[in-house]
Image (cartoon, rainbow, N blue to C red):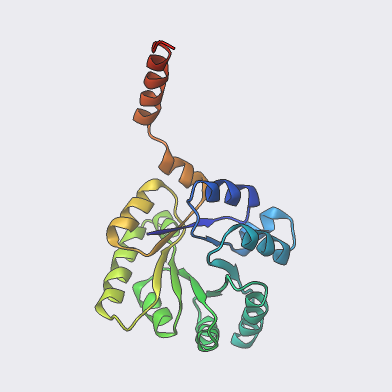
Amino acid sequence: MKFFIDTADISEIREAHAMGMVDGVTTNPSLIAKTGRRFEDVLQDICAIVDGPISAEAVAESAADLLADGLRLSAIHPNIVVKLPLTGEGLKACRELTNRGIRTNVTLCFSPAQALLAAKAGATWISPFVGRLDDIGHTGMDLISQIVTIYGNYPSLKTEVLVASVRHPLHVVEAAMMGADVATIPFSVIGQLLKHPLTDIGIEKFNKDWKKVPV
């Protein structure tokens, strides 16, 4: 499974990339706003660090405006993936961008039916939001299982499952067990994946014993 990092923080991207944890990056308007910087400048900096898909969100309502914004974003760098909302207008833009050879990430997916529609429209990635489903009393990972099964039934559907709104390590582990293609993970969760108390105890013991070894 590929790991994308879900952030627009350049320092977080550099740190995770140095560990080999970054196959791509996902951003959204909220993450970009936190930086206080121009959208294009942030994207250029990310593309200079990560040689992989960088999702940049088109912000508009009509298909025509989404298409125009998507074309503008895709021209910034070859690694840019146009992120689109899972609406009728978003799917129209998705189909047109796909026909033009531009990769797309259809976002804010909350049902298997939506995921099927996005695949039919030619989305490169579908982003189901598992954490937000958990927040309203649903089991978000059930959605991942359903989408993976549906896509697996029809090999002609080439859309990859990109698990989003990841809140904790179990989301990542379950996504990998279900066969999801990608998980986009906040930097904090990458740190949680790394840590285990027995690892810390083992390192402490080895370091203590190493001091007893004659020089």
Residue drawn at (26%, 71%), measured in percent from left and top?
Answer: 149
Residue drawn at (48%, 50%), measured in percent from left and top?
Answer: 20
**Looking at this view, is 138 or 123 the one in front?**
123
Q: Is residue 207 above or below residue 13?
A: above
Q: Is residue 176 above or below residue 64?
A: above
x, y percentage for residue 174? 31, 54
**Looking at this view, is 207 or 39 the one in front?**
207
x, y percentage for residue 189? 47, 46
Looking at the image, residue 26 sits to the left or right of residue 118; the answer is right
Looking at the image, residue 109 sits to the left or right of residue 42; the answer is left
x, y percentage for residue 126? 43, 71
Q: Is residue 201 above or below residue 65?
A: above
In the rendered image, which quarter contains the C terminus? top left
Looking at the image, residue 210 sits to the left or right of residue 73; the answer is left
When asked about the image quadrant of residue 63, the answer is: bottom right
**Looking at this view, is 32 or 101 the one in front?**
101
Q: How many numbered tags mark residues here? A: 0
When asked about the image quadrant of residue 154, the answer is: bottom left
Q: Residue lying farthest front?
A: 215
Residue drawn at (37%, 15%), measured in percent from left and top?
Answer: 209
Q: Is residue 143 above or below residue 210?
A: below
**Looking at this view, is 142 or 56 the one in front?**
56
In the rendered image, which quarter contains the N terminus? bottom left
x, y percentage for residue 200? 40, 27
When asked about the image quadrant of residue 130, the answer is: bottom left
